[in-house]
Amino acid sequence: FVIDPSKLSVHVADVIADYTPGQDVIDLSDLLKSLGAGAPTTDAQAGSSIDVTFSGGAAHVMVDNNGTAAGGSMVEVASLTGVASGSVISILYDHNQPTHTETVT
């Protein structure tokens, strides 16, 4: 599932009803690159710019709208309905790197 960079500015999250943990991938690579000077350049920076939380029966994928730069706020870019707390979500930070995992908290 590729998340479009426009999700950071329009504040309308993609609702994904058929995400399967352990099988599907959330691709944030273009979205993260769109952050310009604040774009994360390491896996650690990318990981600290992303949070996946559980609320209201769904996992919510949040991205810092300034990336590594100061003063940003977390923006929901995707809502994975039916994905439980404790599930492991696969996320692609960069097309040239393997996927990473985030645990829904």
Image (tube, rainbow, N blue to C red):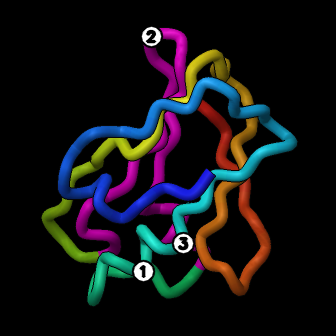
Q: Counting residues from the N terminus, which is met first, the one under dot 2 or under dot 3?
A: 3
Indicate whether residue 37 is drawn in magenta. Answer: no
Q: In which quarter of the image is the C terminus?
A: top right
Q: Which residue is disc 3 drawn over? A: 29
Q: Which residue is disc 1 drawn over? A: 33
Q: Where is residue 16 in the image (x, y as percent from the top left)?
A: 56, 32
Amino acid beneath label 2: Gly
> In the rendered image of this protein, does residue 21 appear above or below residue 81?
below
Q: What element carries label 3?
A: helix
Circle 1 Cα neighbour tier, 10 Å, few/some/many (<14 / 14–19 / ≥20) = some
Q: What element carries label 1?
A: helix
Indicate whether residue 60 is drawn in magenta. Answer: yes
Residue at the image position 46 percent from the left and 40 percent from the top: 78
Q: Position of residue 28 (x, y in %)?
A: 53, 63
The Cα–Cα distance between marks 1 and 3, rounded to whole angstroms, is 6 Å
Amino acid beneath label 3: Ser
The Cα–Cα distance between marks 2 and 3, rounded to whole angstroms, is 27 Å
Q: Which residue is disc 2 drawn over? A: 56
Residue 94 location, quadrant: bottom right
Please give the range of residues in magenta. Answer: 43-68
Q: Residue furthest top?
A: 56
* Left or right of 55 in this view: 11: left
Is 76 in front, or is 44? 76
Residue at the image position 19 percent from the left and 61 percent from the top: 72
Q: Position of residue 8 (x, y in %)?
A: 27, 56
